[in-house]
Amino acid sequence: MSGNALNGSEVMEPDKNGSDGSWVRITDYDPLQGWSEPGQADARARWCCEQLEDGKILFFDGIPYDFPEKDREFLLQQRQSDSRIHKNISYRPSQDMLRGSVADKPEDVERLHGIMRHFSDEITGLLSRVLKPYSAHWSLDYASFRPEEESSRNLSLHKRNDLLHVDAFPSRPTRGNRILRCFTNINPTRARNWLTTDRFPALAEKFAKDAGLEEIAKSGDSTGSWLNALKRAVGLKVVERSAYDKFMLRFHDYLKENSDFQEKCEKIHIAFPPMATWMCYTDCVPHAVLSGQYALEQTFIIPVQALIHPEKSPIRVLEKLAGRPLAAAAC
């Protein structure tokens, strides 16, 4: 047990489930009652935010929100019965839009839409209490259902989930704001197996220069580039990326391309058991998904100014290394 843990939190040691203290088990939160000591709720929520910003993974043994058994059974049955739903399903809460469903029956699509909407609402409610300091500031990004077995997916190098990487979104630049993701393994019998390694500050210190940080930092924001202007002129969609976004996309690919890093870095294996829920900043926590099937996920974008310790964010780490700002909007 770490000496920095508050009551109700367990920082796992190497002899417990293979963890090295990179994840924290939350034991004093109940989905119906909230924190076991209501008078400490604000302190607990702030502490949880600090743990995430330190690169920890917060872990719950069960599903700490309302998720009816009939909904879980529906998701499992859809994949197991003639592959009517066979790939990742995304839900966009701000538009109440479901994407990626290949269900044959309209009523199945409608049911799936309702399940994803309810899941997104429930996860948002959970984090509004567990991570209260963020709740007035975050932007709700996409949710997803992942029914495929990860170990057997045939993907190109840059899309492979089984290689260690940090997250960056090609179509949704964050301009230095943080990517927080919450997962639930709804598989009733099998763990979801992750690898992780040194956190982003250590990787950036070691690899950012070789990955092109200096050149990308000098290139600046793409908003006023001639290429984007030309795209707009002919009616094409333009993605405006800051230097930070450009580097993070490059770093995502660089880590996956770096076979020496993938083979030789120190690895930590975490097996998230059936019905477990966990969350982390995936732009800071390098991760690879080795195996697992049936997971739900919701992404939140946390502004830098909402962080307890903004100096620990990837953009501030990179700006210190580059010696210049990487995104005007990240303040």
Image (cartoon, rainbow, N blue to C red):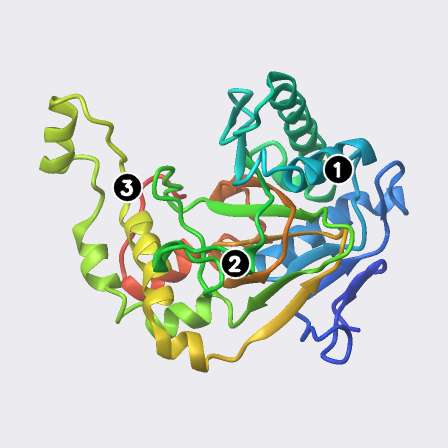
Q: Mark 3 points at which residue?
A: 241
Choose between 320 and 151: the one closer to the eye: 151
Q: Are the two marked residues, 1 and 2, in contact with CB atoms closer than 8 angstroms?
A: no
Res. 18 visible in picture = yes
- Observer-side mark, 2 or 3, equals 2
Q: Residue furthest front?
A: 82
Residue 149 position, x and y percent, is 58, 53
Work out which quarter of the rendered image holds the C terminus and state it: top left
The numbered disc on residue 116 is none
Question: Which amino acid type is shown beneath numbered disc 3?
Answer: Arg
Res. 141 visible in picture = no
Q: Which of marks 2 and 3 is nearer the N terminus?
A: 2
- Observer-side mark, 1 or 3, equals 1
Report the side of 277 relative to 105 (left or right): right
Residue 270 position, x and y percent, is 66, 67
Q: How far apart are marks 2 and 3 (CA)?
A: 33 Å
Q: Distance between the residues labelled 1 and 2?
A: 22 Å
SS of the residue at dot 2? helix
SS of the residue at dot 1? helix
Which quarter of the picture shows residue 63? top right
Q: Name the residue under label 2.
A: 152
Other residues around mark 3 within 10 Å, as few (<14) / some (14–19) / many (≥20): many
Q: Which of marks 1 and 3 is nearer the N terminus?
A: 1
> Taking 156 as reference, is 73 above or below it?
above
Question: Which amino acid type is shown beneath numbered disc 2?
Answer: Ser
Report the side of 72 relative to 150 (left or right): right
Q: Name the residue under label 1.
A: 72
Residue 236 position, x and y percent, is 19, 26
Q: Distance between the residues labelled 1 and 3?
A: 38 Å
